[in-house]
Image: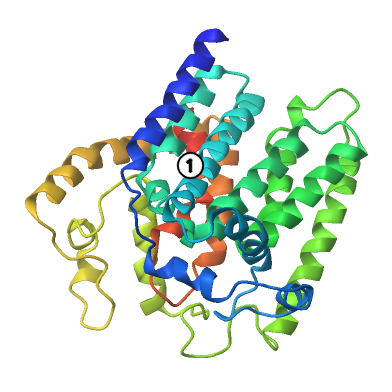
Amino acid sequence: MAGTNRILILIVFLTLGFFSWNSSEFFSPDCVYYFGRRLDSLSETASAFSNLDNRGQYRPLGMVLFSFLFYPLLGFNPAGYHVIPLLFHVANILLVYRITRELAADSRVALGAAFFFALHRCNFFVTFGITFIPDFIGCFFFLAALLVYIRGRGPALYGLAFVLWIFSLGNKETAIVFPALLLCYEWFFADRRPEGWRWTGALTRLLPFAAACLIFVAFVFHLYQGNLYPGDTGHPYRASLSISSLVPKVKYLWWAVNLPQGSGLGNALLPVIANSATLPKISVPYPLPTLIAAALILPFAIGFAAFVIWRLTRRDPLVAFGLAAFILTLAPVLPLAGRVMQHNLYFSMFGLALVAGK
């Protein structure tokens, strides 16, 4: 155990060392949004919880935390706002480790999952500043809720898991898939439940989560006036299931396995799409170093995909659950018609980390 703790500490320090150079003495342009829309009163706070924000999204808790916790502590000092995402990312690394340890009962698998999650390039993208509060804080509450649920042995812990999940839902809509993820957990790890476990009991535990999920969906449906996504055709977060909108989402797959963006692999692997006059281009050739990096990583990515398929044929519950977590947490962002952004993978990296750790 002492050796495991030392390795985990090393992973954390590697993350801090590797990610901290991404900080600077400046704010990123996007994070200025929070300063210009700080909440100053209870009435404004109540309005934040009952209405969409200026970007046409429902993410009130992040703004509340910024307005009444981060800003009073840090003011306009950029350094602190670079530290906050790093600290939350470290907390998420530890949560990934603990969850994997609970599911796999193997410290080596847990360390592998923590290492993958800690240093993944998409997670590096999230930790520059407070721009991505919904992602790193929402993921923190999401993972904390899952860990508490997995370890839960009574109404109090299940109630705590419920509250933590609600906090996650108040940060980012991706958390709406949490009840489905719990159902996958109960399904894939049913044989590890204590004697006397029954599906009726599991479904009873899931009922409050499912009910709250339906209430939240109905509330969002009301806020968007009959839609689950913004109805404005010019809104970057509107939904679109057209081919031209869905094709660029292929980027998420090679970002997930650390293939560089714009390496030309889209043109090489999907020539029909690349040569189409009507479908959008997925990538454009980048300089030689990017191509070399892609060439080095691609064999590992192919091997990783083959490993996942092999473990699924052997009915590995951890790999199946990790893959389900990856797909579920990515699903809400797939219909978005706007730009394909790496930060949308932050929640999903947890599921892929479970698979990579195996």
Image position of 55 with respect to 74: above or below: below
Q: Position of residue 322 (x, y in %)?
A: 55, 40
Q: Quadrant of residue 169?
A: bottom right
Q: Residue at x 68, y 55 (%)?
A: 168
Q: Position of residue 234 (x, y in %)?
A: 46, 89
The secondary element bearing badge 1 is classed as helix
Q: Position of residue 173 (x, y in %)?
A: 63, 64
Query: Please, what is the three-letter code of the amino acid marked with disc 1?
Result: Leu
Image position of 250 with respect to 325: above or below: below
Name the one closer to the observer, 79 or 293.
Answer: 79
Residue 315 visible in the displayed image: no
Image side of residue 301 versus residue 203, left or right: left
Marks counted in the figure total: 1
Q: Position of residue 121 (x, y in %)?
A: 35, 46
Image position of 42 with respect to 17: above or below: below
Name the one closer to the observer, 64 or 183.
Answer: 64
Q: Residue furthest top?
A: 2
Q: Residue at x 24, y 72 (%)?
A: 281
Image quarter where the N terminus lies is top right
Name the one closer to the observer, 135 or 41.
Answer: 41
Q: Residue furthest left?
A: 288
Residue at label 1? 352
Name the one closer to the observer, 244 or 86.
Answer: 86
Residue 43 visible in the displayed image: yes
